[in-house]
Image (spheres, coloured by chain):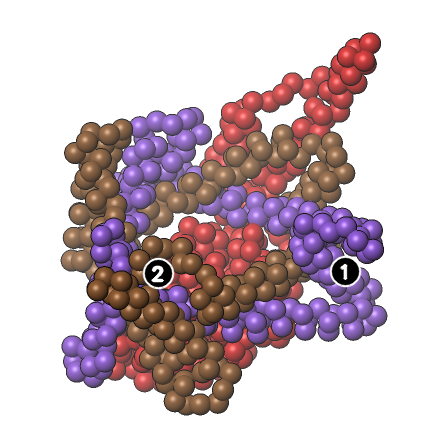
Amino acid sequence: MISTDPWVWVSAFMTICSFTLLYGDNILFRIGEYTYTCTVVAHSVVTGIPTITNYFYPLFTGAKPLMIFPLILGIMSIFVVWRKYAWIASFPYALFIGVGTGLTLRALVMTDILGNAQTTIKEAANILVGSPADQLGFAVRVIFTISATIYLFFTLFHKGPLSKPVGYIRTFGKYAFIIYLGISVGNGIMQQSGLATSAINRLIRQWLGL
Amino acid sequence: MSALRTYIRSYMVRIIIIIGILSGLISFYFVSPEAVAVATELQTWNSAAAAWTLFVGIITVFARYVRSIMKRTQYWQYRAYGIVLMVVWVIMGAIVGLYSDLYQTAFYSTKITLHIAILGQLVFFFTSGVYRTFRMKTFRTAIYAFFAMLLIIGNAPWMLATFPQVDKLTYWLLENPSMSGERTLALTGGIGGAVLGIRILLGLEKGALRATEAS
Amino acid sequence: MIKVPELKSQYIWAVLLVVYLFTAIQPIGAPFQMSDATIKAHDVIESLPPKSIVAMGGSGVFAFDLESSAAQIAAIIQMARKGLRLVAVPLGTEAVQFEKYCIDAALVDKKFGGPWTYGVDYVVLPYLAGGSAALVSFLTSVRSQVSTDVKGTPIDQLPIMNDFRSYKDIALWTCPHRDFPIIARYVTGERGIPSIAFAQAAAYSLYAVYMMIYPDKIWMTNGFLGGAQYEDLEGISGLGHAAIDSYAIISAVVIAFIVLGNIRLLSTLGDEKEEVKEEKV
């Protein structure tokens, strides 16, 4: 039984608009494209309303009078859209860059650099420990990580006394990356397939009631 | 006077950046409740100020669309529709609220449905793409195609139902060779990010946005 | 050798469309195996004592995160059944809608669990702007970032928020979003809070890096398959099952096209060799 819910009809229309791209550029696709763009932008504004209420509620109740400073900085940040007055936005953006960089620096060092290096060393120590699958796994991790890292570090190849062995390791690292990309792509198709299922099911089951 | 203003602006920006960076680092690496309090306050200010940037998008898009409609450029009709949609959407959202069922239904039926359909279409482009590109003409392509196929088959219910051990192989591939590639990217990306952060701290980086350079 | 013609993309798309339409109209109910990874993630939530506060949050895009919703919805049903409490912490602009979608789809205030009551058993906080800065200050002191919920109610009027002051009150963090790395770094890495990533398939390997750095603190499920497995563990059937159903055939179709492409390559190799010989002559 075909749906009588107007939102299901809107949803079906949008799905069809999007899928018409498979045929080629057309009016329906453009409608879908502009609907997408405008709802994203408008949604940001609608999200901003409770967000700002949340942050500045303590200012208006008197609980946190210092919130006047981020209020001023926030309004200054909007000036980025005007070329002539964009310099006003440099102060809040400096705060965003500074705070963000400080947090990112500490997280990258602790987790991404030291954490990964530490884990690779631990795995190297475990190459002869555990079941054959585990041992092979640890060996693969260590060898692939080191060779792929050398491949990235020596992307611009330097000639010298160690150039030949480094060259071989680089080549192996390149293939390690190819294997990684192949596995990622193969695993990722499940996501795309599932989303296509969701879209088409909406048309067939929800809209047409089949 | 203008040169002095520029000088003061430029150094104020750099001082703010340095204070921001140091607050995050000192509060983590030193045991100091005062430093944690200052850092938390700055992070709150950062969030509260950043919330206002949510309105930057609509101003920019609005201005561009109005210019386009006035000059009757290509697709101006769609932009007129876009402006009407944006206004109606903001008014609806402000009245019914972000967490209301009506807003959720409207958002899901339009933007989310479109996005899901766009992403879902990728499987069509992916399939026609692999038909052409996964032709094992070279060793490199053969390796790439082989491992991709291994994972496609490894996640397939018909394979898992017939050979349950394939599940262990799939996870082994994901957690060993594939994870190693990601680990390398995380390691080298982390080094790059840390170097960039230090360069920003030392004032060696020019801001990508006009606004971060007080000029 | 038989010459295989080069297929136009439109023919390939048409075949795929027919397959999807078939599975939409006639679900095949493809069986699938349970994975240890999903069982481990399920057991972590199962082991939490009642009234524990679980945070659900992160930053991502709704459409991408839909793949994670299958497992997250099943996990919310599990949390309601176990008498846990949920705080939704959206760190992305679409995360508010996505987390509402997961909670609504779980029907925990109607069908499953207690039923759950808003403000007592679960709460949805407003969007926290600023990414990692918002997350870090939120973890240090919840009230530094949050003074109302997403509906505008002051948090002092919500009973659940009386027990939630900082990261020390969080028993577990679940992330059904794309941006799990910031959760891994700041929630698990810096503060030791265990976390579960309901990972999208394309991001599994990326999150696995953090799983190796913090073993026994990070668990993951793998995309729609993990979602279908989690649904099975909770005895429900949702998007995960539907996605795996169609994937059962799509996977075979994709493999078939790859094989066909390689047969086409083999059939034209002979022609290329002849062309090369003719050029030499």
- Point 54% across, 75% down: residue: C189
Q: Residue at x 47, y 45 (%)?
A: A195
What is the tally of numbered marks visible in this picture?
A: 2
> Label 1 crowding class (10 Å Cα cut-off): few <14, some 14-19, many 20+?
many
Task: Select label 2 or label 1 by which is in front.
Answer: 2
The percent position of residue A210, horizontal first and vertical second, equals: 40, 37
Return the x and y of residue A86 as percentages of the image width and height: 26, 56
Q: Based on the displayed image, in which of its 4 quarters is residue B19 positioned?
A: bottom left
Query: Which residue occupies 79% across, 10% down?
Result: C278
Which quadrant of the rendered structure holds the N terminus of chain A? top left
Residue A85 visible in image = yes
Q: Residue under circle 2? A: B212
Callout 2: chain: B
**Which color was chain A given?**
purple
Can you give x and y, in whole percent of width and height, for residue A145 in the image?
A: 71, 60
Residue at mark 1: A143
Badge 2 amino acid: Thr
Chain B: its colour in the image is: brown
**Subunit that carries the residue with mark 1:** A
Discs 2 and 1 carry the same chain letter:
no
Instruction: Using the image as rendered, state which of residue C50 and residue A163 is in the foreground.
Output: A163
**In the image, is residue B181 above or below residue B13?**
above
Secondary structure of residue under mark 2 = helix
> Which quadrant of the structure image shows residue C105?
bottom left
Q: Are marks 2 and 1 in contact (CB under 8 Å)?
A: no
Q: Residue at x 35, y 32 (%)?
A: A29
Most foreground residue, B159 or C112: B159
Identify the disc placed on residue A210.
none
Please tell me the colour of chain C. red
Figure quadrant of residue B42: bottom left
Tell me the SS state at disc 1. helix
User: With C233 as the anchor, is B105 left or right in this view?
Assistant: left
